[in-house]
Image: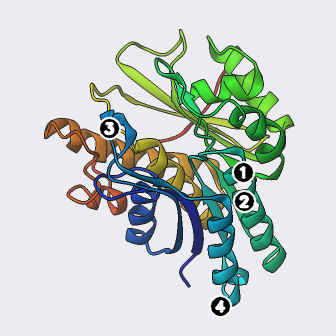
Amino acid sequence: MSELILSIQSHVAYGHVGNDAAMFPLQRLGAEVIAIHTVQFSNHTGYGAWTGEVFSAASIADLVRGVEARGVLGLCDGVISGYMGSAEIGMAILDAALTVRSANPGALYCCDPVMGDVGSGVFVRPEIPEMMRTKAMAEADIVTPNQFELCLLTGHEVTDHASLVHAVQALHALGPKIIMVTSVMTNETPDDAIDCIASDGTKMVIVRTPRLSLAVNGAGDAISALFFLHWLRDHSVSNALAQAVSSIYGILKRTEDEGSREILLIPAQEELVHPTHKFKAELFAS
């Protein structure tokens, strides 16, 4: 039976970020998706200009109630969230996750704590990091920060493997049982490589790939969805990380080869099912 996932994220008319980066990979791999959009923009904000609107927390809650009335929330295997435009929207998303859990105690919540990145810094409203730290982390079963967000959530600087382990342990202490950190680069990462790590609280694993020379939006949204789905299927951080990274690397390599400004999810969709490059997860040695 297909997994059913409630995805509450942003939506763009053109391009692939938020729900438009997460939904198709989940569907291509056989999962059903209930999508609730937090915004509807013409394109992602990386272009510097866009049109559209941010939906209110009340409208998100209203949509959740409408879906609940169909009697399907109890069938959900999980909830995934991404960019939260305000603390009010964030609380509406957490309420949605709790509503799903009430209907199905076995459902899991995956939170991609979108707040910023190296170079751009924090790009969300000032109240979001604190809300993430004190509210969202306590409710999330799985979190998928990038390295910058890991540091922001824990207050720990990450420079080497030992400090990375320390920061991951500090994030576990906030509540999440499963952590996947994307785009890890420490002084122990080769210049031509990039690392991704995952932890289940008892072990950490790492996947290292060649570093690509492109900057596109949406890869984090897609890899979070992929990691979540693969983990739901076999509850192995090693397998989930290896499969998610292998697929995203293949898609990004195709995107780089064709010089696209947008991640090529559709042309490179076979990478979701049969990745060209199959990376293995290794035990992380600090």
Q: Which residue is mark 4?
A: 70
Q: Mark 1 to mark 4: distance in Å?
A: 25 Å
In the visual, does 78 lie left or right of 252? right
- The mark that comes first in sequence, 2 or 4, is 4
Q: Residues within 10 Å of mark 2 (few under 14, many from 20)?
A: many
- The amino acid type of the residue labelled 3 equals Ala
Q: Is residue 74 above or below residue 10?
A: below
At label 1, the amino acid type is Glu
How far apart are the two marked residues, 2 and 4, measured between alpha carbons? Answer: 19 Å
Which amino acid type is shown beneath numbered disc 4?
Arg
Q: Which mark is residue 88?
A: 1
Q: Please state which of the two labelled residues, at mark 4 or mark 3, is closer to the viewer.
A: 3
Image: 213 above or below 125: above
Which residue is painted at 62% across and 29% down in the image? 149
Q: Secondary structure at mark 2?
A: helix
Side of 132 relative to 5 (left or right): right
Q: Residue at x 61, y 42 (%)?
A: 144
First-in-chain label (1 vs 4): 4
Q: Position of residue 43 (x, y in %)?
A: 32, 48
Residue positioned most to the left: 258
Q: Amino acid at mark 2?
A: Ala
Instruction: Identify the mark nearer the N-term, 4 or 3.
Output: 3
123 and 285: which is toward the camera: 123
The quarter holding residue 27 reads bottom left
